[in-house]
Image: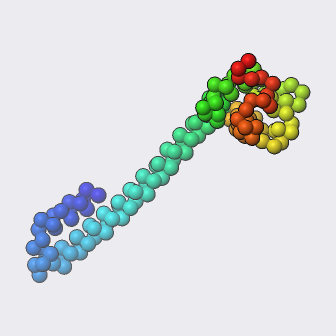
Amino acid sequence: MKMDTSVIRFFESHRWLLSDRRFQKEANRRLGAARKHLASTKAQAARARVQLARRTRAAEQQRLQEQLERSPAKAICHVFGSYCKQALQVARCESGYRTTAQNGQYRGLFQMGSSERQLFGHGVSALQQARAAYRYFVRSGRDWSPWSCKPWS
């Protein structure tokens, strides 16, 4: 890019070369080639920046996903947002933050029953279980009544 820019600047400050019959043909050819190559290089750099941004975003999302799946508390807060504190209290009471907790038909962080798991989903990771519990929570009017543990108890 530097070389192409230098060639273009040279001909901008030596315009007479573009109109002098002795140099006109070669000067215009070199100037045109420099402009074309510079445009191509800029386009290639722009594509590389877009790819880098995509890879960076994908890597950040992957790191966040891994972090959320390793930490039940972080997954719960990520999903429940402003209800984080209440959801943490319910999950702690229901399962002790264990994704593998089981009590009869009730399973996971929020001890959802088989019919609730069928309706709202479930999964092995804390993030999947928190998302399912959040769907259930929203469907119940953002109320903790379906759970035996309450955040205020």
Quarter of image, res 1 = bottom left
Up the image or down, 51 lies above or below 34; here it is above
Q: Residue at x 18, y 73 (%)?
A: 27
Q: Is residue 90 visible?
A: yes
Residue 79 image offset from top left, x and y in percent? 64, 35
Seen at 70% across and 20% down, the residue is 152
Indicate left or right for 75 with 60 as reference: right
Can residue 66 be seen here?
Answer: no
Tell me which residue sits at (81%, 24%) in the image: 148
Relative height, residue 26 to residue 69 (above, below): below
Which residue is at the front of the view, 143 or 67?
Answer: 143
Residue 14, percent from left and from top = 11, 68
Relative side of 119 to 134, left or right: right
- Spot the residue most to the right: 104
Total residue callouts:
0
Residue 46: % across, % down: 40, 57
Left-right relation of 90 to 57: right
Residue depicted at 81% across the width and 38% down the height: 117
Judging depth in this view, the residue of 68 and 105 nearest the camera is 105
Give the image location of residue 83, x and y in percent: 64, 30
Which colour scheme appears in the figure? rainbow
Q: Is residue 119 above or below residue 91?
A: below
Examine the image and state in which quarter residue 132 appears.
top right
- The quarter of the image holding the C terminus is top right
